[in-house]
Image (cartoon, rainbow, N blue to C red):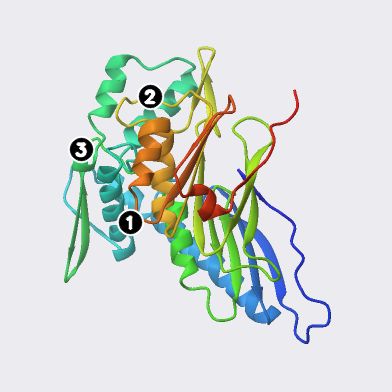
Amino acid sequence: MLALLGLCVGCAGAPAPPIELSDGSYAMGTLLELTLVGRDRAALAEARDAVVEEVERLEAMLSTWRPDSEVSRLNAAAGGSPVPVDAEVAELLARSLALSRATRGTFDVTVGPLVALWVGAAARGSLPTEEMIAAARARVGPDRLAVLVEADGARATLAEGSAIDLGGVAKGYALDRVRVHLGDAVDAALLSFGQSSTWAVGRPPDASGWRLLARAPGDGFSGVLTLRDQALSVSGSLGQWSEIEGRRFGHVLDPRSGWPLIRRREALVVGGDATEAEALSKAVLVLGPEEGIALVERWPGAEALLLDADGRSWRTRGWDAATRYEELPAPAG
């Protein structure tokens, strides 16, 4: 998790000091936090309202919690005829398929059957059998989803028994969409969903970038990042968890094995695209220190840091320079 460090805005004696407008609203199952910097308070308020409206529009299409969303309609039609979908939904689904293949299946939006399996296991308080896991895994994979974009519109087809879950990428996609529509009134901005998916646009007054605290996998903070025109995704293996038969299981699943992650780790990925950063942070968690960091090393424009609860850390060669990372000492005791 991240926390914005306090920054002084405004400059004594300047004829027209910049204005900072901060606000928050509930969206996509978490808190959408906005800090906008500009010269006109009314224009910043309009920009804030436009951001919230755009996020609400995207949530209405992408959320599986809304039975009338396009993704919910696609899930309901699994095994049937192709379903017409909005061009933006088609774009995100197609990108997700490409990201799934590029991350060797460690990020996969068709993970819905496994999510449902483990939600049910938590509700029952008993682990699923290997047969149940195998049956759910058989309904997961990029080959279960097809997206077709033609001149007369876009359509998607989902195999029988499969289900789309965009919870691991929709927030990053929404921030990417919002960022390009901020408007000229916004000189800089920090846009964040629950401090897990963030876009740091420009820089605040009198600072080289937006300074953020990165929380350690256990208690305390691991370091300070300074970001400018960069997207950041933070994924924790036990950020949310359920206890089943006396063991803690995280909400991040390995689609290849069908099992949730159980080791407490936190992955941070920065880059020029929040959608990609979200997918990569999940992949780093699932793949682990060697394979996960190696994956991001080969990814253009992205850098990663993986933190373990025992104090160990692994990072790409460019992480420190890209984030101006300042490591903090571990808490005493």
Q: Nearer the viewer, residue 110 or 216?
A: 216
Image coords of residue 234 (percent x, y): 52, 44
Residue 210 spot, x, y in % from top left? 63, 60
Q: Position of residue 105 (x, y in %)?
A: 28, 37
Q: Is residue 146 left or right of 54 when viewed as pictured?
A: left
User: Residue lying farthest top?
Assistant: 245
User: Badge 1 is on which residue?
Assistant: 92
Question: To which quarter of the image does residue 49 belong?
Answer: bottom right
* Mark 1 and mark 3: Cα distance apart in space: 21 Å
Residue for badge 2 = 259
Disc 2 marks a residue whose amino acid type is Trp
Residue in the image at 59% along x and 76% along y: 186
Q: Nearer the viewer, residue 326 or 57?
A: 326
Q: Secondary structure at mark 2?
A: loop
User: According to the image, label 3 marks what residue?
Assistant: 160
Of tags 1 and 3, the one toward the viewer is 1
